[in-house]
Image (tube, rainbow, N blue to C red):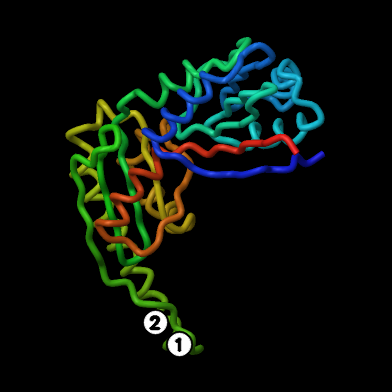
Amino acid sequence: MVAPIARKFYLRRSKMLDFLSELEKSSALTATSVYIMPGLPLSEIEDLLGKAGAEPFNDYLAQVAYSSKNGAALFWGDERKCLVLPPFPFREKAVFGGYVAGPLRSLLESDFRIGLVLVHLGTYAIGICHGEKLISSKVGTGLVHGRHKKGGSSQQRFQRRRQNQAQEFLDRVCARVQEQFQPHERHLDYVVYGGPRQTVLLLQKRCSFLKSFEDRVLPLMDVPALRQQVLETAVGRVWSSCIIEWSEV
């Protein structure tokens, strides 16, 4: 059964911490808090959620939590009902009586050091943020012609030239990533990629330097054509939590 969603919204770190403070003020007499780490089997997620008494929404909640690459936190009681998808992964599962926001608050208050690699063919933006502060960045462009719509040998020549341009561009992006990341390499908690999935995959394939960060990659971010303002906006999006909240009908 699909749960009727009263509202779905996103909050950046400071607003999310305020949201949790208000949540903790709610009556905890009949509330339960459930923390779900990513990678759990669906059956185990269903068992954890069953302890919150969230019927008939359990199937919907379990599917959303199972699909989240960072896990989920459910706060379910007579006064407040919400599911939070955090910006970073939970490391443990837990069930508490009452509205217990401590584990999520601790996650949000951690000043993670995050590398951002945003790339479209022809433009890129690379940055390092500490908490929500962008501490270094590089934005640039490169020549990659658009697709050739005519046929024949001219199209083949054009495609080869375009492929060479794309490879040269991605190699340049890889070099810029190394310049930005190497001073912070040992201290990076997470890496976020943004842009068309195929372009990101091509970059990862050509840039062996990025392989050392494969164990700390956050979900892919959709970003428009790149410039400094997009990079700064992306930092806020990295730190944003998704909240699905229900209200009594």
Name the element at disc 2. helix
Where's the N terminus, which quadrant? top right
- Near-viewer residue (56 or 194): 56
| Amino acid type assigned to the residue bearing label 1 in the image | Ser
- Near-viewer residue (117 or 243): 243
Can residue 229 be seen in this snapshot? yes
- Residue 221 coordinates in the image, percent (x, y): 45, 49
Q: Answer left or right for 232 relative to 104.
A: left
* Residue 125: quarter of image: bottom left
Q: Which mark is residue 157?
A: 2
* Residue 4: quarter of image: top right
Name the element at disc 1. helix
Relative to 169, is 208 above or below? above
**Disc 1 target residue:** 153
Name the residue rendered at 34%, 28% in the picture.
Answer: 189
Rounded to the nearest angstrom, the CA distance separating label 2 from label 1 is 6 Å
- Residue 100 coordinates in the image, percent (x, y): 54, 15
Name the residue rendered at 51%, 88% in the picture.
Answer: 151
Q: Are marks 2 and 1 in contact (CB under 8 Å)?
A: yes
Where's the C terminus, which quadrant? top right
